[in-house]
Structure formats: structure tokens, C-alpha cells
Amino acid sequence: MTIDSQSSNRTDEPAHPSKRNADLVAAFTEHFGTRPDFISVGPGRVNLIGEHTDYNDGFVLPVALKRDVRLAVRRREDNTVNLLSVEYGGAFTFDLNDFHSSHENLWANYVMGVAWALQERGIALTGMDAAISGNVPRASGLSSSAALEISSALAFLKNADALDALPGAQIAKTAQRAENAFVGVNSGIMDQFISMLGSEDHVLLIDCRSLDYQLIPFPAGASLVIGNTKASRSLASSAYNERRAQCEEGVRLLQSALPGITALRDVSVEDLESHRALLPDLIYRRCKHVVHENQRVLDTVAALEAGDLDEVGRLMSASHDSLRDDYEVSSPALDVMVEAMRETPGCLGARLTGAGFGGCTVALVRTGDEQGVANAVYEKYPKATNIWPEVYLSRAAGGARIEEV
Ligand code: GLA
């Protein structure tokens, strides 16, 4: 297809959930020869603002997406877990008393990790047959991993009659533990938390230290336009760990003047400037991003509550500039896409979302101008990068849930 034939009046929207459920039930029935009992759903997320703050005990402001991972599930009375991945076409079996991570079926490690982490918390699980299907783009910064972890956690908990055994924040913590300790990815708490506790038409302010949270109505008169750069994120995991280490180094150096601090969350903008001389320039710039980003999240909440959409957009754009210049996790592809969005009428602000180095951008756009912003991305981005992007429209969707079949 040529660029011209794709460039107007379309975005890349997913199939309707009822069609997806019907397809998933059909795949389950064909593979397992019986019908599932229920479907568990874990959504992906897009972060409005508060990037690289979660592992610094700070604040984040994500929304859940209507894109999600779904498991069609039938309970088993033994300890066997039989998994079928609809998209990968692979099947995988494990025993709840014997966990070995898989090198061939990496997706299965997320499900296994969650079972391992739930049992570690003392929850007795039972086996299941499950067919898995997702439409959160993978490796794109929209948290397909957290969506799989959370939908798996709900499936195991429902089968164990233990849906009320843990509060949502602790289910999120358990899924994060699975990702950190079983899968081996050192992520923060944001993605699992919003997948679990997102709420339709709301953004979620999360205090990543206390795990307190607050739902804030998604603003009337605006929506989100998400652009997928489709650019590789090959640097993401090594650079992510390096950024985390640089933040810890900043805390260590600042402690000589500020002995009470344990994370960058404890450092104010004024503190940082007063003690700037303690930090090498690179570490200062990393800390500057985090300290100001925490403040931007709180300022965004105030602006949302005041209905000041221009200010929300301005803060989102300031976040991107800081991620690009000081935290240095942007990429030419992300910058080109963000610029294409910002130049378009009706775009209030735009930034990269997620860890960076590729993946997705998010723009806050006045209602009615969404397609114009999408068209600007379809038109300008491929010319600059030779890569065909995807664009998704979104408000805020609901969090994890069990659906009847
Ligand atoms: C990834 C991690 C999150 C968070 C973001 C950056 O999505 O999984 O925990 O650190 O990067 O804000």
C-alpha cells in the first residue's frame, strides 16, 4: 500500500472486544476440546506524564488502554498449566510445583513467573488450561508484558477462589515481582499497577513509594492520540538499567548534604540546585529530569483539576524535552513523531511514553482534531524515517477484570 492511500481518515483501531472474545473462545475450544469457564483481561497502558519516576519512588499518571491481553481459562483440579498462545501459535505446559523458565517460549515465562510469585505469597493455586490472545503492540512501550502478567494473575486468583485475597496494589506488586525476579526485567511498579487498577474515563495518580493512588477524571474536550514509531528498542534494557544506576548514584552523592534522603523522590527542585556542585554534569542532568518530572506530575494533576488543558499539554511537552535533553532516552524517530504531532492544530502537547529509545509517543489533542494529528503522523513520519507508523486513538479504559463467556 502506498503512503498516500493510507494517509487520511484512518487510524489503527482494534477489533471489537466481543469479536475478540468469540475468536478466543473458538481457539480455546479447538485446542482443548471443551469450552472455557471465563476470560480474564489485563489492559496495556499509556503514561500521560511521570516517566522514569516510578523506580525513584516518585509519581506517575498513566491511563489504561482498550488494548489488552485476554486469557480464556478452564480450571483444572491438578497442578498442570497448559497454555496456548493464539498469536505465537505455540503451546507450553508447566507444573505448579516445578518452575523452569523457557528459552523458546519467552511469553510463557510471564505466566509462569506470576504463578511462582503468587505461590511465594502463600496463595495455593490450582492448574488451568488457558488460551492467550493480545492486541497490545509488543515491545512498543504500551506494557504488553504487564497486561499478560495481570491477566494471568487474575486467572490464577479466580481459579483459586482468591480474587479478594490481595488488594489490587498487592496483585500489581506480585506481578512486578514476577517480572523482576522470574523474567529478569528490572521494571518499576507503574505498568502492573495501572493495568490492575485503571478505571474508565480516569487517569490514575500513583505514589510509587506508598502505593497510594487517586483516580482523576479524564478531561472533557480532549483525547489521546498514540503514535507507534515501530522503531526498534534494542538499547532499551541496558540503558534502562544504566539510568537506574545513575539515579542511585545521584542519591548517594546528595546524601552527603541531605542525609535524610533515600530516593530522588525526597529531593526538591531547590535542594537539587543548592547542591548541584556535588554532582558530575551527567548525573546532575539525570537527577534534574527526575526531580522536575515529579513536580510536573503534581502540576499536571492541579491543571487537570482546574480544567486547564493548555497547561497539561505544556507540561507533557516539557516532559519530552527533558527526556530528550537531560535523561537522553529519546531517539530521532520519537523526536520526529513528537514534532509532527506538536505542529498540528489541536495538539496541546506531545511526548514519548514508556521507557524510550523507540516505542510510542502520546499527544493530548482537542476533541475533533484527533484525525488531523493522526494524519500529520502518517504523512510526515514515514518521509523522515522510511518507517510506516501506527496511530491509535484513546481515552481512558477500564482496568483488569473477569468477563463471562
Ligand atoms: C518501563 C517500566 C516502567 C517505567 C517506565 C519509564 O515502562 O516498565 O516501570 O519505569 O519504563 O517510566
Image: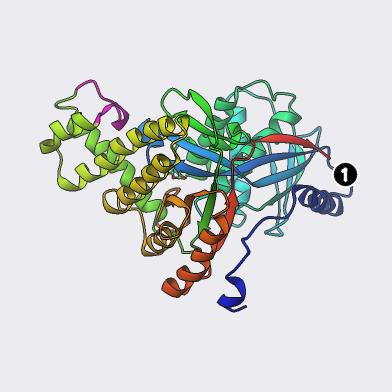
Residue in front for this viewpoint, 246 or 220: 220
Q: How many marks?
A: 1
Residue placed furthest toward the bottom? 2
Residue in front for this viewpoint, 275 or 102: 275
| Residue 131 visible | yes
In the rendered image, residue 39 lying in the magenta stretch gets the answer no
Q: Is mark 1 within 8 Å of ligand 1?
A: no
* Chain part drawn in magenta: 259-268
| Residue 102 visible | no
Rendered image quadrant of residue 254 = top left
Residue at 47% across, 25% down: 211
Residue at 75% across, 30% down: 159
Residue in front for this viewpoint, 219 or 133: 219
Q: Is residue 52 left or right of residue 226?
A: left
Rendered image quadrant of residue 169 = top right
Provide the major secondary structure of the magenta segment: loop
Q: Residues within 10 Å of mark 1 (few under 14, many from 20)?
A: some
| Secondary element type, mark 1 | loop
- Work out which quarter of the rendered image holds the N terminus and state it: bottom right
Give the image quadrant in which the ligand numbered 1 is located. top left
Model colouring = rainbow
Q: Is residue 249 left or right of residue 29?
A: left
Residue 45 at what x, y percent from top left?
A: 55, 44
Residue in front for this viewpoint, 307 or 244: 307
Residue 322 at what x, y percent from top left?
A: 30, 48
Residue 226 at what x, y percent from top left?
A: 53, 53
Q: Is residue 297 left or right of residue 372?
A: left
Query: Vertically, is 386 above or below 41?
Result: below
Residue tagged 1: 35
Residue 33 at what x, y percent from top left?
A: 89, 49
Query: Vertically, is 135 above or below 204?
Result: below
Residue at 47% across, 64% down: 231
